Amino acid sequence: MQDFLEINNQKINRGEIKQIILNDYELHSKTKIEIPVHVIRSKNTGPTMLLCAGMHGEETNGIEIVRKLISREEIQNLKCGNLIAIPVINVVSFLYGTRDLPDGRDLNRCFPGSKSGSLGSRIANDIMKHILPIIDFGVDFHTGGAKISNFPQLRCVYNFADNLQLAEKFSASFIIDSNYREGTFRHEAAKKNKPILVYEGGESMRFDYHAINEGINGCLRLMKSFNMIDLDLPNNPYIKIKKDLWIRANSSGLFHMNVNNGAHVQKGDLVGFICNPFGDIVNKIISTTDGYILGVNNRPVVNEGDALIHIGIELD
């Protein structure tokens, strides 16, 4: 392990805890926006792990997970290795309370970025240039979109590098074999042979303490597996998901769930129903497969074709 880590010309020595600034960015008002990075280093050799959240400004559960983790005593006193933590990558959208940047771009479609591109492209470029080269693996925290609540789950590509092994050590309730998407952080990281797990839990702009606690415990289990911390944690049973599908609204109206998020369902089960505003049940929502509820639409008013229930099918 190097005597010092360097992030954008800022050095962090062994055994040091330091908050640095990844870079600053100028808004149209001439206001400077900074992205803080927390670096916690042990004196002993070990892996370098990244925790990052707030890629989308309204996804607050991940921000809370990282905030709580970096304040823990065992994290502040790592037995070995290094922790790089970025509680809010997309500070601009966080300030606005929006998913996307002011120009309408999704930061998680801007990678690998460019030093002379848009705001999102510049932030992505700084992550790729200054953070990715010094880490071994990481966890990128997300939530469901507006009114979509995801049951705690990890998304990774099973056959890439150590993805599945890392995911099993984290052991969220569900581990989903999820293909890469162009322009995302984890896809570009994979091209550099750096595995990034994506943790999904809860919904935007709403704290989900079950998802927060499971995210925290998963990170602690992962760090424990590399002897970065000394902490006894119970194992969390997980289910591997080979494919997934959405059940969509077969009519417009008021949507009512009939099952709990995370529950197991069988083909033919009544999982919800849609009624009109005048009290009549218009249509029953029937599961088309055996599987597990990965996420639900909490929006009470739906239109025909809207995604309602996300179902995962277990790996044989």
Image (cartoon, rainbow, N blue to C red):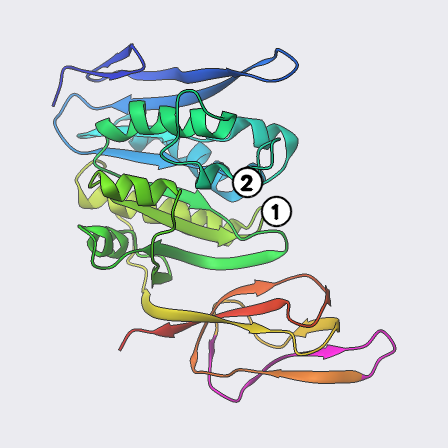
In this view, the residue in front, 157 or 110, is 110
Image location (x, y in percent) of residue 99: 58, 40
The C terminus lies in quadrant: bottom left
In the current view of this chain or complex, which residue is farthest to the right?
278
Q: Residue at x 59, y 47 (%)?
A: 204
Q: Residue 261 has which mark?
A: none
Residue 291 picture quarter: bottom left
Question: Would you name the residue on which mark 2 appears?
Answer: 60
Is residue 208 among the parts visible in the rendering? yes
Q: Say left or right for 179 vs 116.
A: left
In this view, the residue in front, 113 or 101, is 113
Q: Is residue 83 magenta?
A: no
Q: Say left or right for 185 vs 83.
A: right
Q: Residue at x 37, y 70 (%)?
A: 243
Q: Residues within 10 Å of mark 1 (few under 14, many from 20)?
A: some
Are discs 2 and 1 less than 8 Å apart at CB? yes
Image location (x, y in percent) of residue 295: 52, 63
What type is the residue that disc 2 sits on?
Thr
Q: Say left or right for 125 vs 95.
A: left
Image location (x, y in percent) of residue 271: 58, 79
What type is the residue that disc 1 sits on?
Arg
- Marked residue nearer the N-terminal end (2 or 1): 2
**Which residues, given as a range, are shown in magenta?**
264-280
Q: CA distance from mark 2 to mark 1?
A: 7 Å
Provide the secondary structure element on which disc 1 rests. Answer: loop
Provide the secondary structure element on which disc 2 rests. Answer: helix
Q: Is residue 269 magenta?
A: yes
Question: Would you name the residue on which mark 1 appears?
Answer: 206
